[in-house]
Image: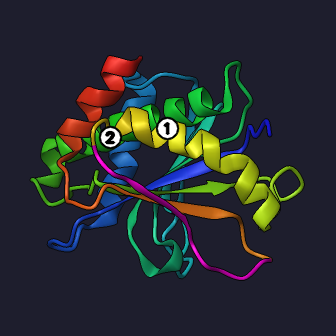
Amino acid sequence: MNLDRFTVKFFAKPGPAVDESIFIPIFHEWIRFGPIDGVLLDVADYRHVPDGPGVMLITHEINFALDHGDGRFGLLAQRKQGRDGSQAAKILDLVRQAVSVADLLENDWRLDDSLRFEAGAFEFAANDRLQAPNTPASLAALLPHLQAVSAQLYPGRAVAVEPVVNDSRERLTVRFDAGQSLPLSELLAQVEALA
């Protein structure tokens, strides 16, 4: 399997409600000053959509959304463009990008420590139903790559890499769970060491 379009989502830890309008000026500032890799293009506001993508940072390669999908708030990173490398390397790169953005958000003074992400678990979803339909065969083809990713992200830990049970018409989704809460800084250090 050679999947180029997929997502990862890191969920926000419970805490005080964040006024999500603050993400709009933060993302506009990023477009001007470029603290993340890639070609940053625009900011989109979908906060009016129930269980939707919220505020989005649109880049040429990846969309970043403060997403409310399935009623759970978190940072969703969606790879749109293919890149070279193995399937595991492509997934690791998107995780690195997502964790870098999450770290910038956690440390932005305007959020006043109100946003923290859980790094001990995240979800992966195939965003190409033609290449990776939500079937046992697709899961079997993708699972070795996902297990290789988990071993690199969480070395020395027993990580559950399990499919999310959903309707077969939904995207193939897999949850990574290291079995304990981890600070984002720990995962960030690991992905930077892998780069």
- Image x and y of residue 42, in percent: 57, 40
Q: Going 79% across and 53% down the picture, which residue do you hit?
A: 128
Q: What's the amino acid at mark 2?
A: Tyr
Using the rendered view, name the quadrant where residue 145 is placed.
top right
Question: Does the segment drawn in magenta span residue 158?
Answer: yes
Q: Secondary structure at mark 1?
A: helix
| Dominant secondary structure (helix, strand or loop) of the stretch shown in magenta | loop
Closer to the camera in the image, 109 or 86: 86
Measure the alpha-carbon separation of dots 1 and 2.
Answer: 8 Å
Describe residue 16's horizontal placement relative to residue 35 as left or right: left
Q: Going 17% across and 41% down the picture, which residue do you hit?
A: 107
Q: Locate the N terminus and report the quarter of the image it occupies.
A: top right
Q: Which residue is mark 2?
A: 154
Using the rendered view, name the quadrant where residue 135 is placed.
bottom right
Question: Does the segment drawn in magenta span residue 123?
Answer: no
Q: Estimate how packed mark 1 is, as few (under 14), some (14 to 19) or many (20 or more) residues with alpha carbons within 10 Å.
A: many
- Image x and y of residue 88, in percent: 59, 32
Q: Locate the C terminus and report the quarter of the image it occupies.
A: top left
Question: Bounds of the magenta span?
Answer: 157-168
Q: Secondary structure at mark 2?
A: loop
Q: What's the amino acid at mark 1?
A: Val
First-in-chain label (1 vs 2): 1
Describe residue 189's horizontal placement relative to residue 168 as left or right: left
Q: Going 54% across and 23% down the picture, which residue do you hit?
A: 38
Closer to the camera in the image, 62 or 182: 182
Reply above or below: 126 against 109.
below
Report the disc number at residue 149.
1
Reply above or below: 150 against 113.
above
Q: How many marks?
A: 2
